[in-house]
């Protein structure tokens, strides 16, 4: 969990938390990294209620956590998500 640095061991690279976070968004919503800053719930077609749950699942898998219902509901933007993961689940960005 919580990979703070890129670690290279025998050619294997473990991504930083921010890269894991961004990857979850980009793969869940089929968007590019440049579209992430300022992104908010329902601002794009793919971030509807179903897409939201897909994103939450991707984040829970990436960081090996189980998010609380209140946090899932409060997860309303790219920036708010980082705040929730950092404050409530110990994920450092």
Image (cartoon, rainbow, N blue to C red):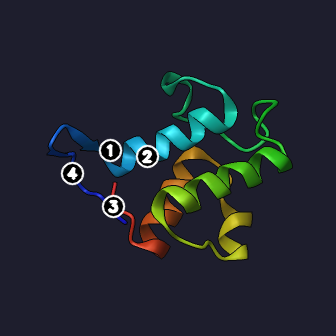
Image position of 66 with respect to 51: above or below: below
Q: Is residue 37 above or below residue 57?
A: above
- Check the picture and name the quadrant holding the N terminus: bottom left
- Residue name at image x 66 percent, y 38 percent: 28
Image vertical order of residue 82 relative to residue 32, above or below: below
Q: Is disc 4 in contact with disc 2, using a CB cutoff of under 8 Å?
A: no
Residue bearing mark 3 = 92
The residue tagged 2 is 20
Say whether disc 3 or disc 2 marks the residue closer to the N-terminus: 2
Q: Is residue 3 at all visible to an observer of this figure?
A: yes
**In the picture, residue 31 is in which quadrant?**
top right
Disc 1 target residue: 15
Q: Earlier in the sequence, mark 2 or mark 1?
A: 1
Check disc 4 and report the residue beneath it: 5
User: Could you classify mark 3 by the number of other residues whose Cα lies within 10 Å: few (under 14), some (14-19), or many (20 or more)?
Assistant: some
Q: Distance between the Cα atoms at labels 1 and 3?
A: 13 Å
The picture places residue 60, in percent across and down from the top left corner, at 57, 62
Q: From the viewer's side, name the closer residue of 9 and 86.
A: 9
């Amino acid at each position: 969990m919580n990979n703070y640095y890129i670690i290279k061991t025998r050619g294997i690279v473990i991504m930083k938390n921010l890269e894991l976070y961004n990857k979850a968004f980009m793969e869940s919503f089929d968007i590019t990294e440049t579209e992430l800053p300022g992104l908010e719930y329902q601002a794009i077609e793919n971030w509807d209620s179903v897409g939201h749950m897909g994103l939450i699942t991707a984040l829970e898998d990436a960081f090996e956590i189980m998010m609380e219902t209140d946090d899932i509901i409060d997860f309303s933007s790219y920036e708010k998500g980082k705040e929730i993961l950092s404050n409530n689940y110990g994920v450092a960005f």
